[in-house]
Amino acid sequence: MADVSDATFNTAVVERSHTVPVVVDLWAPWCGPCQTLGPILERVVAATGGAVELVKVNVDDNPQTAQAFRVQGIPAVYGLRDGKVVDGFVGAQGEDAVTEFVQRLLPTEQETEVEALVAAGDEASLRRALELDPDHEAAVVALAELLVADDHADEALELLERIPETAEVRRVAALARTGGDNADHDVEARLEDLLGRVKADPDARQEFVDLLEIMGADDPRTAGYRRRLTTQLY
């Protein structure tokens, strides 16, 4: 159990919940029901042996977190997985109800199997993971990248359509459309050549954008080329 503040909430709760389910107990020292519920939460979460973690947020000292949860009454308890609230309740609860709540946060046998398959990372394992969970984002991206490397770009692009667009999805899609060429030492020459054609030629424009996606936002050249693209187009 850890005390979390507005400043540490994103790291200690949101980011952490991508690794392990996190229970957030919103409480205040003056709240009688909070004092009753707190020890129950601590006991039930501790019984998971680390499979679930508990954090406590004093709403008096951390108004931003309270506002983010739109707290209207305390104790308010929320369970997060993969950065999202998946369950919660308001008001004091008995130990049986709290136990049921915490158990719902634990991964199922299938989810555990899928995570193990994704961690294995080979094509057969990733395909099996997607049989069990067709929209598993990490499995989709990992398999798509393997397919690009294996010259199966069309299948990779079709696969990526299953999941919402993210920076990583855009990067792998760009690799697929450019033939997986992310180690081109003449990338600047390619960009310069394309730049003069981007306004009139949609294919040139797509290739230009794809090359920037592959370079990534951390490449110091990317921002400059994005500005030059905007100038050419508008």
Image (cartoon, helix red, strand yellow):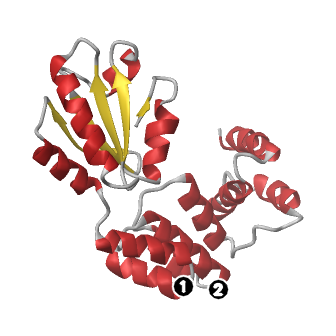
Q: Quadrant of the C terminus?
A: top right
- Is 1 placed left or right of 185 in the picture? left
**Residue 191 vertical placement versus 12 (above, below):** below
Name the amino acid type tagged 2.
Asp
Where in the figure is residue 86, as x and y percent of width and height?
Answer: 27, 47
Q: Give the distance between the C-alpha atoms of the residues marked 2 and 1, in whole angstroms.
A: 11 Å
- Looking at this view, is 190 or 199 the one in front? 190
Circle on res. 150: 2
CB atoms of marks 2 and 1 within 8 Å: yes
Residue indicated by mark 1 = 123
Q: Is residue 166 above or below residue 179?
A: above
Q: Is residue 84 visible?
A: yes
Q: Position of residue 24 (x, y in %)?
A: 33, 36
Who is closer to the viewer here, 199 or 138?
A: 138
Q: Residue 122: which quarter of the image? A: bottom right
Which element carries disc 1, helix, strand or loop? helix
Q: Is residue 29 above or below residue 232?
A: above
Give the residue at x 48% y 37%. 12
* Residue 35 at x, y percent in the picture: 22, 23
Q: Residue 197, located in which quarter of the rendered image?
A: bottom right
Residue drawn at (52%, 68%) of the image? 141
